Image (cartoon, helix red, strand yellow):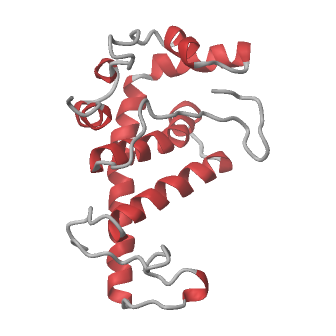
Amino acid sequence: MTIVPRGQALGVTYSRPADDIVNYTEPYLRARIQVALGGRIAEEIIFNVSSTGAENDIKQATGLARQMVVRWGMSPKVGLVSLAGDDGNEFLGGAFGMGREHGEAMAGVVDQETRRIIDECYVSARALVERERDRLAALAESLLEHESLDHDEILRVTNLPPKTHSGRIDPAAIVPEPVMHALAPPAE
């Protein structure tokens, strides 16, 4: 994690999965959306203001939520249908609206479901950031002093538990049960 500007970004947090994952569960995807929304939520809680700094995070969260709806059947209202084209473009036809096979009513449902997923993830993530505000403050203070922190430094500064015997951090220490379950490795 760094607050040193990189390109257009004023700071960057990079997280890599503990294992190679090729099949993502809905709870895992929701946890990733919550992570993406964390910076904006922290701005709102700490500074009582929003800035343009979360643009890419919001774009990633929205894209992931939309994929959950149009590609992976994770919306009860849309159901188990794929609305993505063969070339990987979403149901809206990709570039220039070409090739759309679905009507305006379905487009509205997709937008509503995407928004619902984002809103639900926002509520969960906000509760987590509010609950862990002291750790957030400790992390911010350390970043102001050191500018960049690696994994072990983040754990130390935020007083997070050490890695478990499997080499993974036990998310139960800080993450709500549904998110913790999503991030847990599959049973061996």
Q: State left or right for residue 112 relative to residue 62.
A: left
Q: Quadrant of residue 177?
A: top left
Q: Is residue 144 above or below residue 47?
A: above
Q: Position of residue 126 (x, y in %)?
A: 40, 38
Q: Is residue 180 above or below residue 160?
A: below
Quadrant the C terminus occupies: top left
* Rendered residue at 48%/17% (across/down): 135
Q: Position of residue 13 (x, y in %)?
A: 60, 33
Q: State left or right for residue 30 relative to residue 154.
A: left
* Rendered residue at 55%/30% (across/down): 46
* Rendered residue at 73%/20% (across/down): 147
Q: Is residue 148 above or below residue 20?
A: above
Query: Total label count?
Result: 0
Q: Nearer the viewer, residue 44 or 61?
A: 61
Q: Nearer the viewer, residue 161 or 174?
A: 161
Q: Position of residue 167 (x, y in %)?
A: 39, 16
* Rendered residue at 36%/80% (across/down): 108
Quadrant the N terminus occupies: top right
